[in-house]
Amino acid sequence: MYNNDRAITDVPVNMCYAVKCDSCGKTTWAGCGKHVEQVMKEVKDEDKCTCERA
């Protein structure tokens, strides 16, 4: 669903970080899952990916 090579921010790998969804092109997240809210809070609702996570 997402490509880690397209990280929007540089954050340590053991944390969550924003990525561009390969399906819809909107912003989603990758990483451990513990920091999703922190990563996505600055993303506008209309820019957030709503695709089902694999």
Image (cartoon, helix red, strand yellow):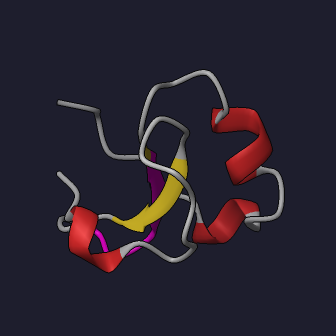
Q: Is residue 23 left or right of residue 53?
A: left
Picture coordinates of residue 46, whole percent (x, y)? 65, 68
Residue located farthest toward the top when viewing the structure as drawn: 34
Magenta-span inclusion, residue 4 = no
Above/below status of 8 relative to 39: below
Picture coordinates of residue 2, whole percent (x, y)? 23, 58
Above/below status of 45 relative to 9: above
Picture coordinates of residue 44, whole percent (x, y)? 76, 67
Toward the viewer: 21 or 51?
Answer: 21
Q: Is residue 42 left or right of residue 10?
A: right
Residue at the spot x=17%, y=30% of the render? 54
Magenta-span inclusion, residue 25 = yes
Residue at the spot x=60%, y=71% of the render? 47
Picture coordinates of residue 36, whole percent (x, y)? 63, 35
| Residue 35 falls in image quadrant | top right
Residue at the spot x=57%, y=59% of the render? 11
Above/below status of 27 relative to 15: below
Above/below status of 27 relative to 34: below
Q: Is residue 54 left or right of residue 45?
A: left
Query: How many numbered discs?
Result: 0
Residue at the spot x=31%, y=78% of the render? 6
Q: Which residues are magenta?
A: 24-29
Toward the viewer: 9 or 40?
Answer: 9
